[in-house]
């Protein structure tokens, strides 16, 4: 039984596991968004947001896959720059939530799309904080499995930030 667990763990933490995760997330969001949009379920801005998020995730995975096919050699990683970038997730979401709190509509009946965006931004802050913590305990450059785990967390934070920004944008456009 442990051999199967190790095989699954090896696949999940491999570059193919990450690609499968990302493509599944992108296609899943695209399908969900199109079902919401074409079935006229919920708010139109939310359906467009989920569709756009799926397209973003899918296109980002394709672009990165092409990039990794072109670039074969990597320099030693600079964790400081990556840590600063991960901190930007937390800061960006915090600033947007602060702006919403100060300048947003003060009525309790905010559109559902805005509520989803706020939850996504709060999730981004939490996931981004975990990402910064993982980078503070930076693994060795040769520990590919640990770096792949960090990539999973990075993509979750990116998706949460993207969903939050897209929700707020679509809610404002369709106001």
Image (spheres, rainbow, N blue to C red):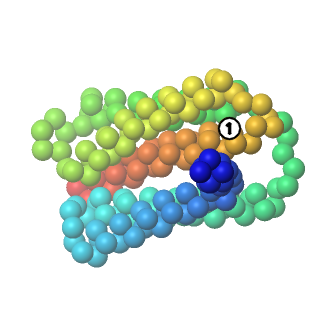
Tell me: residue 130, above or below residue 2.
Answer: above
Q: Residue furthest front?
A: 1
Instruction: Name the side, left or right, on which 149 lies relative to 40.
Output: right
Q: Where is residue 75? Give x, y as percent.
A: 85, 40
Please name whichever residue, 21 or 92, is drawn nearer the observer in this view of the structure. 21
> Can residue 28 be seen at all in this image of the molecule?
yes
Q: Which residue is pictured at 44% across the width and 45% down the height?
A: 160
> Can residue 151 be seen at all in this image of the molecule?
no
Instruction: Name the side, left or right, on which 113 lies relative to 89.
Output: left
Q: Which residue is pictured at 50% across the width and 33% down the height?
A: 128
Tell me: residue 5, above or below residue 127.
Answer: below
Q: Residue furthest bottom?
A: 38
Q: Which residue is pictured at 77% across the width and 31% down the height?
A: 140
Instruction: Name the side, left or right, on which 98 lies relative to 107.
Output: right
Please name whichever residue, 106 or 136, is drawn nearer the observer in this view of the structure. 136
Secondary structure found at label 1: helix
**Mark 1 packing: few (<14 Cα in 10 Å), some, or many (20+)?**
some
Quarter where residue 96 is shown: top left
Tell me: residue 114, above or below residue 41.
Answer: above
Instruction: Name the side, left or right, on which 55 lies relative to 174.
Output: right
Q: Which residue is pictured at 39% across the width and 70% down the height?
A: 31
Q: Where is residue 45? Give x, y as percent.
A: 29, 60
Q: Where is residue 148? Give x, y as percent.
A: 66, 44
Q: Where is residue 159? Give x, y as percent.
A: 48, 49
Please name whichever residue, 19 or 117, is drawn nearer the observer in this view of the structure. 19
Q: Where is mark 1, residue-wise?
A: 146
Image quadrant where one finds the C terminus: bottom left
Q: Residue furthest left?
A: 108
């Amino acid at each position: 039984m442990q051999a199967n667990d190790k095989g699954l763990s090896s696949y999940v933490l491999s570059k193919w596991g990450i690609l499968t995760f990302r493509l599944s997330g992108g296609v899943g969001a695209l399908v969900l968004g199109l079902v919401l949009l074409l079935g006229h379920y919920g708010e139109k801005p939310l359906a467009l947001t989920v569709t756009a998020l799926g397209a973003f995730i899918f296109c980002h995975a394709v672009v990165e896959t092409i990039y990794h096919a072109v670039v074969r050699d990597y320099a030693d990683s600079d964790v400081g720059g990556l840590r600063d970038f991960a901190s930007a997730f937390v800061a960006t979401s915090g600033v947007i939530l602060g702006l919403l709190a100060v300048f947003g509509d003060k009525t309790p009946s905010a559109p559902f799309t805005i509520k989803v965006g706020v939850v996504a931004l709060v999730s981004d802050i939490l996931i981004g904080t975990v990402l910064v913590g993982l980078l503070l305990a930076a693994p060795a450059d040769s520990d590919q499995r640990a770096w792949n785990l960090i990539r999973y967390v990075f993509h979750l934070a990116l998706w949460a930030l993207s969903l939050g920004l897209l929700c707020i944008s679509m809610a404002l456009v369709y106001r």
